Amino acid sequence: MIIGFVGLGAMGSVMVGNLLDAGHPVRVWNRSPGPVRELTERGATAVADLAEIFTAEIVISMLANDAAVSENLLDDQLLAAAPEGAVHVNMATVSAELADRADRQHRTHGLHYVAAPVLGRVEVARAGNLTILAAGDSAAIAKAQPLFDVLGRRTWAVSDRPAHANLVKILGNYLVACSIEALAEATTVAEAAELDPTLLVDILTEGLFTGPVYQGYGAMIAARTYEPVAFRLALGRKDVELALDTARSHQVPLAFGSVLRDVFTEAVAHGQSDRDWAAVTETTRRHAGLDQR
Amino acid sequence: MIIGFVGLGAMGSVMVGNLLDAGHPVRVWNRSPGPVRELTERGATAVADLAEIFTAEIVISMLANDAAVSENLLDDQLLAAAPEGAVHVNMATVSAELADRADRQHRTHGLHYVAAPVLGRVEVARAGNLTILAAGDSAAIAKAQPLFDVLGRRTWAVSDRPAHANLVKILGNYLVACSIEALAEATTVAEAAELDPTLLVDILTEGLFTGPVYQGYGAMIAARTYEPVAFRLALGRKDVELALDTARSHQVPLAFGSVLRDVFTEAVAHGQSDRDWAAVTETTRRHAGLDQR
Amino acid sequence: MIIGFVGLGAMGSVMVGNLLDAGHPVRVWNRSPGPVRELTERGATAVADLAEIFTAEIVISMLANDAAVSENLLDDQLLAAAPEGAVHVNMATVSAELADRADRQHRTHGLHYVAAPVLGRVEVARAGNLTILAAGDSAAIAKAQPLFDVLGRRTWAVSDRPAHANLVKILGNYLVACSIEALAEATTVAEAAELDPTLLVDILTEGLFTGPVYQGYGAMIAARTYEPVAFRLALGRKDVELALDTARSHQVPLAFGSVLRDVFTEAVAHGQSDRDWAAVTETTRRHAGLDQR
Amino acid sequence: MIIGFVGLGAMGSVMVGNLLDAGHPVRVWNRSPGPVRELTERGATAVADLAEIFTAEIVISMLANDAAVSENLLDDQLLAAAPEGAVHVNMATVSAELADRADRQHRTHGLHYVAAPVLGRVEVARAGNLTILAAGDSAAIAKAQPLFDVLGRRTWAVSDRPAHANLVKILGNYLVACSIEALAEATTVAEAAELDPTLLVDILTEGLFTGPVYQGYGAMIAARTYEPVAFRLALGRKDVELALDTARSHQVPLAFGSVLRDVFTEAVAHGQSDRDWAAVTETTRRHAGLDQR
């Protein structure tokens, strides 16, 4: 089965590499040529036209955001030319609203749209250890499953409605943002009270809050080292807004979300956009005037 | 070494039981006679007068709150009669302010005050698996260590300042409260969007948010079953206020804490004081009008 | 000087009536025919084509929102056909962003764009007592001044940048929303403490908080009568979002604004969209569980 | 009728002066002697013992806070010696809880406790223009009315329950604090958008938000001049806490109040305690990073 792959950013390139290593033939398309060349050397076939990608039975896309998906892939002419019953698996983090729209549009053309956003960053992807959140037609998911097995350690069949997979991803990121803020507040109190923040985090993540989020961000926050950047603060802010917008579309007020919106806006106003999003900690510290004590 | 033990609530009784099972002689005192009788049958010695407890070289107290400690134990006459160099280990969750005061008062009388609040509830205590947060004079902690080894699976030497142990405990509970609210918000969005909240929690606690807090409360919140009551909501509210008060005494604003204060007040206004504190979830659901949809 | 007038909603119709009464010739255009007929009977000239409106030296528009302005008036063909130096006065409440865009587009075609949103509702407009917030080229404002003198009691020359007038209007509405929430919280405490909310409002608006906002909304909120509807809650919510979006575009976090967003979302979730925005009071009362006491 | 007067701070001294000027005989008591001397020169009689004050038929007190009232006046021996039916009018800003307690204690001794806090600061008091909020037994209020007529321009008979007068005062201050924060947020957006904050305030306080609060604080906030200090920020913070505590005792969450608590805590952390409370504006400006742009 030939795979069409659209979007060769950091994640996309790693995923294509793994598919090639597993013996799958992959046709790739990317806006800029750099990543294409590298992958053709590893066996991928470069195609110049997106339409050619969509002649494949299964297409995986990994574009940056809603706008990129909307402009490049939600094109009636492009979709009309795809073979009946073809499957398009969008593994990027996009909004639930976009997923609903994409799903409708693909159905119109007799195609299957599967949303399959992932948990895990580049290093996890490289190791083939992503957690894949798949939603859409179950037969379509089954068709993609052998590829998911290459890319990830586990696939969750979330629901038959693609938007639900995006919702899980968005709410997952929302919980991470909440954890960061909670850790920032607790460590700021510790610092103000002359209790070692690293010791605090060590104790609480040893038994109560195990897992990579609290342990990873806890260590960064306690030590106030926001390098290397795992996730840019500006992107974190966008994801918080995504959660708020989705909640709002369902008339759900998010009290913590409103706090996060303000905290991230302040961090951006203070020039922290390009640091890791754990740097919102500095906002809480500034509120407490810690650097002036 | 004879141990004096004050306060035979659910936790205190279980702890005395474990000390007796380990072969330690224990003198016990409690305001009400019920729990005393049960423990004397198991080998404890009941004493009628608190002063007699304080003739022991090591006293452990496990009273309900600041007021109970202050009224019963921070008594100059009582402390003056204790043998020079005796150690008082307060394992209850009290405020950092009370710890500071108790520490000063014990020093005045040539005694050692060790704060040693615990992580873990009754079942964990029964299994001798508590996590013990000890702070105070290191020689005094060393003296208590054989008892800590009976009661818990691990002792953290937090600091030489007793209040710091209480601060860790308070901030730990604060992080738990934040987790509950974050989970409540995420599952409410899921419910409003017709995504199964239990599936959401299963996915997110499998890899990202492992550990007992997210897994335990996550399951309760997703299923909206707030029984059995692990921790009463009214007590949770008190702990949130404790965190806010401590933070305020250090001039640290807690944005999430302010939200929690409002959410817990609303839960109490709606008659939820005696349910498990995970029931604050119902506040977020009410905000979203879910029961009226 | 012939006036072109676009948008005959409740406000627009009243304004055209006043211009006619003052002896000005007015050409009118509206999407639906009803209001047109009424005004032609009073002397206005109906035109079928928007382009004909834009042959006038001065055009006033009063459309519902950003989208209506954008679709109908920010059309290059339409603007290109207007006479060099013509003035377009947009008196509707639109975003500062739209004003910036409209200003640039009008300049391109050699036209003047004046933003002139108003303070005051239909009854105030009928009496010719609006407060007009004008911003743009000063010569263009001077040209419109005779018409402003008919429509309002006072014109403020805000700035030479049109968006600034919209910003004043948006921030004015923001302060009103804040007042409503503050009054809602104070009267809810009064009710819970068995103090007559109307007496509270009477006392505080007699000396400290005079003026129509506190006196008008204070009386409604204390009595919990949200009829007649002066301003729909759904519109109020939109205006709060407008303030938040503008603030966010300038990297300003609004702590009260975040609370308002949540409170208005909850009110909508509870079916209050079509009541007066003072009805957000019921949200605060619900939080306090007042109807269940 | 001889008047006993307790508490000669800035407000108390001015009030006694006015009573003397109106021809009333006044016995005064104060902890420190300075203000006593000044008033005896104007005709007051100094008494050394509080008990002597309480032999008067009517006693007015104007002490600093709950603690001062509780320590000095809520003394059973003192109250037992007062003549049956005597009236004690407490005109200070104290908590509703203290008023309830004082009321009960006075009744026990056959005395009347009237709460009569005032709106207006020293200059207003000097001109005899205070607004007096009186609550308690109506006959007792009637007895004090001639004195209220000297001290104020208007007396409100709030309720027969003294605590209600204190509640009105506390909620009045709460509304002022909310106004300050709302103005701070609006002017910060204006500044960030390069719109003159003073113009914004001038426009909005001309028609919509008349009255001393918006006009007075609006001008201070727009100009960022927090001198002279009308009300110290540390006291403003205390009053916000008073409102929150009262609300909490009635299980009413105050969303704006929680924001205020955080904003005032941050202002104190940044060393603003002794500036006028309008200086919380600097907190909002700091959040927006305005000084770093």
Image (cartoon, coloured by chain):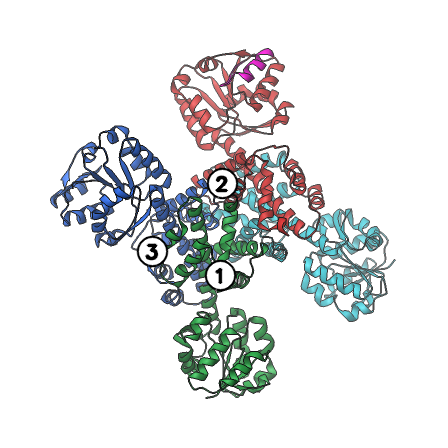
Chain colours: A green, B blue, C cyan, D red
Q: Is residue D287 magenta?
A: no
The residue identified by callout 2 is: C189
Q: Which residue is mark 3?
A: B226
Q: Residue at x 27, y 32 (%)?
A: B110
In terms of depth relative to the viewer, which is nearer, A135 or B156? Answer: B156
Q: Chain of mark 3?
A: B
Alpha-carbon span between mark 3 and mark 1: 41 Å
Residue sticking out furthest to the front? B139
Rounded to the nearest whole Å, what is the CA distance between mark 2 and mark 1?
48 Å
Chain under callout 1? A
Q: Amino acid at mark 3?
A: Tyr
What residue is at 37 percent from the left and 44 percent from the top? B238
Coordinates of residue C22 in the picture (x, y in percent): 84, 51
- Please state the chain letter of the residue tagged with numbered disc 2 in the rendered image: C
Residue C266 is at least partly visible in this image: no
Circle 2: residue type: Val
Instruction: Give the image location of residue B21, x and y in percent.
Output: 14, 50
The type of residue carrying mark 1 is: Glu
**Mark 3, mark 2: which one is toward the viewer?**
3
Same chain letter for marks 2 and 1: no
**Does the residue at mark 3 contact the one at mark 1 (Cβ under 8 Å)?**
no
